[in-house]
Amino acid sequence: MDNKIIRNSSEKLSIVVALILVYIILFEFVLTPVRFLPKPSILFESFISLWDSYNLAVLLFSTTSIIYFALLLGSLSVTFTAKYLLKIIYEYPGILNISTPFKYFTAFFFAIIFNLWFSDSFIAEFVFALLFVFAFMMSALISESKNRREEYILAARSLGLDNNEIYGKVIWKELQPRIFEKLLKLHVSLWMIVLVYEFIGQTEGVGSLYFSAFQYNDIGAIIALGILVSLLILLGNMLIKFLNNKIFFWE
Amino acid sequence: MNIENLSKDYFDSTGHIVHLLEDINLNINEGELTSILAPTGAGKSSLLKIISRLENPTSGKIEDNSKKKIFIPDEPSSFPWLNVKENILFNLSNNNDTELKAVISLVGLEGYEDHYPNNKSLGFRFRISLARAIMNNADLIVIDESFTKIRDEVKKRIYLLLRRVIAEKKISFLFGTSNISEAILLSDKIFLMDKNPGRILDSFEINYEDQLRTGFIDSQEYTEYRERIKTYLTKTNPNKIINVSL
C-alpha cells in the first residue's frame, strides 16, 4: 500500500517537473513574445515582489486565519451539537425545510450581500466563512444521516440507550469519519469563497491582492499567487488527511 | 417466556396489508437455547425484534419474566470506534474488573482487550457482542442469524462457546436461523416456522447427554434428528427451508 502511494506520488512529481521544464524552455527561450504566460524569470521576480510590494505576509496571515479558524470552529460546533442536530434531522425533518428557499442561491450572492452590509469588516468575513462551513457540514450530515447502520442502533437500543444517547454515542460516532472526509472538499471550496469575498469587497486578504494585481495587469503576480495558494491548499489537504487518518483510524 | 397468538401486519409500498406473522405461539424455557428455524423472509427477524421489545406486534400476548433481554443483530454489532474492553463495557456505569476478566476469558478474547474490531473476523465481533450481553446481566440473549457469513470451522467453535455459556451462566438464548444443522447442534428446542405468513408449524426437543454437545455432530442422534426434521419438512412443507448444510 505504502509502495503504491510512493509510486503514485513520484509519478505525479515527475509530471510536475516535466511540465515546469517544458514551461521554462518554451516561455524563456522559444515563445518569448507570447503574452498569456509570463517568462519564468519574470515569474520568479513576481514571487519576490509579492512579499515586498504587495505586503503578502500580512494579507496571507489574514486570509489563512479566517479560513482555518472558521474550519476549526465550524467543525467543533458541529461536533458538540451533533446530538441535537441529528435529533432535528430524524425527529423534526420539517424544520430543515426553512433552508429550502436559500438552497439555490450561490455562495457568491451571499458574499456580495455580506460585503454590502458590513463593508471592510474582518469579523463579518469570519462570520461569513463560519456560516459557509456550518452550512456545508450540515448538508453533509443530512445526506450521511440516511446511511446509518441499523444493527448499531438495534444493539444500542437493546442495551438500554434512549434516542438522545443513540444520536450522540452511536450515530454521530458512526457518521463522523464520513463527515470529516468531506472536509477536504470543504477546505478547497472555503479557500475559493473567501478569496471571492475579499476580491469583491477588497477587504484585507489574498483576494484583495488578486484585485490589485488584476488592476495593474500584473500577470506574473497573479500566476505566482495562484501557485502559492494552490500549494497552501495542497498542504492543508495533506494535514486534514493526516489528522483524519489519526483520529478516525477505524475507517 | 410465553408468546400467545402473536401477529404482525404491515402495509407494503402499494398500500396493501401484508400478514407477516400470524398466530405465533411459543415458549422459551429458562437456561435453554431455543431456535426458530425458518426460511429467509419468513419474518424471523421481526419476531425476534418483537420478543426483544424493539418492535411492537399488531396483536398477541407476551408473558415475560426476563429482566434484561439483549438482541444481537445478524451483522455483529460491536462498535468499530471502541476497543474490545470499551465495547464490552459500553453504557455500563459500574464495572467489576474480576467479572470483566472472567467474561473475556469465557468468550475467548483474553489478550485482545485493547484490540479494535475493525478488520477482525465476524466470529471475533460476535464474541464481543456476546461478552457485552453477558456483562449486561442479560437473562435472555436473542441472536438473529449471526453466523451465516462465518466460516464453518469458526462456527463450530462458536457453537461450543454458546453451549458453554448456557452451562456456566444459565442464560436463556433465542436463536433465529435458516440452517437445520445449526439449529440441531445448538438448540434444546426448535420451533419450525413457515412463511407467507410466518406461522409456527411444529416444535422438536433436542436431547443429548453432553451439555456442551461435543461429538454431537458425529453421533447417530444428530443424524436421526436431522432426518426427522427433513422428513417432516418434505411431507408438510417441501422446498421451504433452503439451507441444510453445516
Image (cartoon, rainbow, N blue to C red):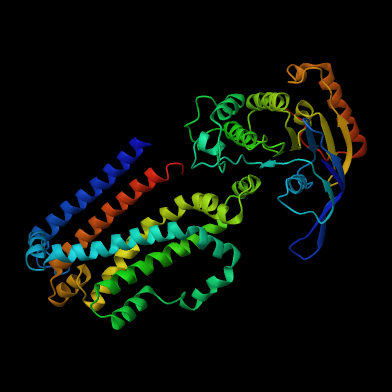
Residue situated in front as seen by the camera: A96 or A41: A96
Residue B82: x, y in percent? 49, 40
Q: Residue at x 15, y 77 (%)?
A: A215
**Residue sitting nearer the eye, B120 or B89:** B89
Q: Which corner quadrant holds the N terminus of chain A? A: top left
How many marks can you see? Answer: 0
Q: Residue at x 19, y 74 (%)?
A: A211
Task: Specify the farthest residue to the right.
Answer: B235
> Going by the image, does B45 lie left or right of B81?
right
Please state the horizontal and vertical placement of residue B139, each as a whole percent of the image. 72, 36
- Residue A8 visible, this orientation: yes
**Residue A112 vertical position relative to residue B124 in the rendered view, above or below:** below
Up/down of B138 relative to A103, above or below = above
Q: Residue B9's quadrant in the figure?
A: bottom right
Task: From this view, report whether residue B116 is shown above or below residue B60.
Answer: above
- Does residue B49 appear left or right of residue B89 in this picture? right
Depth check, front residue: A49 or B27: B27
List the single residue furthest toward the bottom: A116
* Residue A37 showing in the rendered view: no
Where residue B30 appears, as percent x and y from the top left, is 79, 33
Where is residue A177 drawn, in percent x and y?
45, 50
